[in-house]
Amino acid sequence: MARLLLDSLAASIPFEETKSVETLAAWISRQGETDTEKARILFTWIARNIAYDVQEKFAASNYYEDTLISERALSLRKGVCMHYAVLFCETAGLMDIEAQLVTGQTKQNSVLSTTGHVWVAAKLEGKWYLLDPTWAAGGVNGMRYIKRFSPQWFMTPPDTMILSHLPTDPQWQLLEHPVSLIRFATGKDVPGFDQKYFAFNDSILQYLKLDEVQKALITVGRLKESFKNDGTFPGDSIAKKPRLDEYNLNFVPVIYNQAVDHYNSAIAEMNRYIAHKNKQFTPAIPEATLRGFLSSAAIQLDSVKTLLGYVSDAPYRQLSDIQKKMALTQEAAGFLQNEQAFVDRYYKTPVWKRKSLFYIRKKG
């Protein structure tokens, strides 16, 4: 179906069918035959019907924390880049179209943005493509939004998209030779990086099998590698600000919260052990069970240390919480070590003498 016809279909969607992602997806599914046709109708409708919220762009609130992003966009008929991209991805998902949010930074007229941006990668007919419904909707001049449909941001070729959009995770460049931040910012290659081959299809395939924490760890690893490769250059702090903001706002909380979950699991296992020890291990339970409480707690604490290690250089307020949690983890690990030694001593002691181990004799 010709794109002009698809765009006219987007213009004909009844208002009642656009009040929720469910009704919007159902209507489009009845019109489009292929994933590409459905994606085009959705893309065009969003770009033409959701206005850019200039006030929200400059507001102090963090729109990344909005849990009703699509609902807000459809209700108010406006939003910022996150609303455009999430609305597309959620609606596409209901049509069985695989779509992913792509976060990163942009450049216009050789000027780097100091804020982050969100666009979309969609798998259409078995191949990944890049789309930016926000830029397709129009532009901002000062504090004024200028509505102007720009269809070139649908299925934009990767080698064109990279001229203005740099993903935080290089796999979403969809390029076999990813571009570094320094090349994006200055046009100069980073030896050993900008010429490196990258099998992005294989990387994406493995990435999508991971849970959210594993995805965050992978992306943080690549983000830190990019900082190491980029080094410093003119405008370095401005160029890296969007990535640091994203690291702090998106990835640090995910990894830190997972570390807290592991810590709480360790404490729960330790408390089970303590409950038995307070009763002098009576009634008796199998040695393997008793040791299992401690070994399970130790494994959880090791996970805490590993996760906190990923974000130990968090640049903002989370660093204090991370350091406190690491100190508590070290303290718990010390307690575990002592208790493991106690259990060893307990089982090496003759049964008739074991109760004496629970009493601390005062000197003097």
Image (tube, helix red, strand yellow):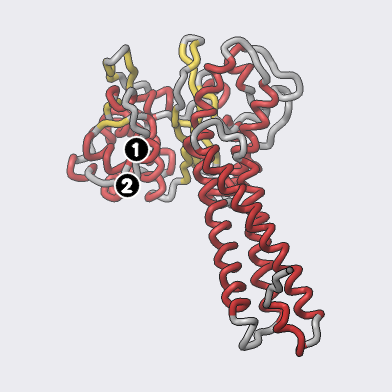
* Residue 192 at x, y percent in the picture: 76, 23
Q: Which of 68 and 201 is in front in this view?
A: 68
Q: Please, what secondary structure does the residue beneath circle 1 have?
A: helix
Q: Residue at x 47, y 9 (%)?
A: 109
- From the viewer's perspective, is residue 275 above or below residue 258? below
Label of residue 167 in the image: none
Determine which residue is flagged by label 1: 42
Q: Which of 236 and 93 is in front in this view?
A: 236
Q: In which quarter of the image is the C terminus?
A: bottom right
Q: In which quarter of the image is residue 186?
A: top right
Q: How many labels does the image show?
A: 2
- From the viewer's perspective, is residue 362 above or below residue 138? below
Kind of residue sitting beneath label 2:
Ala
Q: Which residue is drawn at 73% across and 69% down?
A: 363
Whether residue 90 is visible: yes
Classify 10 Å Cα crowding around label 1: few (below 14), some (14-19), many (20 and above).
many
- From the viewer's perspective, is residue 168 above or below residue 65? above
Q: Which residue is drawn at 58% across and 42% down?
A: 323
Q: Please, what secondary structure does the residue beneath circle 2 have?
A: helix
Whether residue 5 is visible: no
- From the viewer's perspective, is residue 361 above or below residue 46? below
* Residue 92 at x, y percent in the picture: 39, 44
Q: Quadrant of residue 237?
A: top right
Kind of residue sitting beneath label 1:
Leu
Q: In which quarter of the image is the N terminus?
A: top left
Q: Quadrant of residue 263?
A: bottom right
Determine which residue is flagged by label 2: 25
Q: Which residue is drawn at 64% across and 64% down?
A: 297
* Residue 281 at x, y percent in the picture: 64, 82
